Image: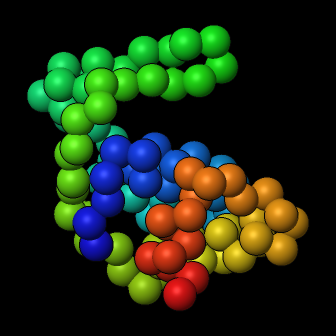
Amino acid sequence: MKFNVIERVMLSSILPKEGNFTNLKLVREINEQLSFDEEENKTLNFRQDGDQMRWNPVEIIKDIELGSVATALIVKELTRMDKEEKLTIEHYSLCEKFLD
């Protein structure tokens, strides 16, 4: 599945922070795939501006392979956030990819 910069940042932020050992190991592997390599970091120039993260407006798309368990974890979290009305506009494209 292909993800842009904001999707990678948002997806990383919604992954579960606790769970069983197997799922935590999977979450760690997903976070490694979502992370930005040195070249991407140089190009994007991430910086903190108050409580917001900013970066250069460069379109970088990364293809990340997610298995069925990882996908289920993401769907579960997005569904929970939807029910609690905690989704933001930044989650929109992730919802289209995972909840459609």
> In the image, is residue 48 above or below residue 54?
above
Placement of 4 over or under 76, stated as above or below: above
Q: Is residue 34 left or right of residue 12?
A: left
User: In this orientation, which residue lies closer to the viewer: 64 or 70?
Assistant: 64
x, y percent for residue 41: 24, 25
- As drawn, the residue found furthest toward the left would be 39
Residue 56: image quadrant is: top left
Q: Is residue 72 above or below residue 30?
A: below
In this orientation, does residue 24 appear? Answer: no
**Which of these two is toward me, 58 or 69?**
58
Residue at position x 21%, y 55% in the image: 62
* Of residues 96 and 16, the one drawn nearer to the viewer in this rendering: 96
Residue 20 makes an appearance in the image: yes
Instruction: Please state the horizontal and vertical placement of residue 53, each as a whole percent of the image.
Output: 51, 25
Measured as percent of width and height from the top left, residue 28 is found at 44, 52
Residue at the image point whose x is 58% and y is 58% from the top: 91
- Residue 1 placement, left or right of 98: left
Badge count = 0
Q: Which quarter of the rendering shows the N terminus?
A: bottom left
Q: Quadrant of residue 37?
A: top left
Relative image position of residue 72 (x, y in whole percent): 55, 81
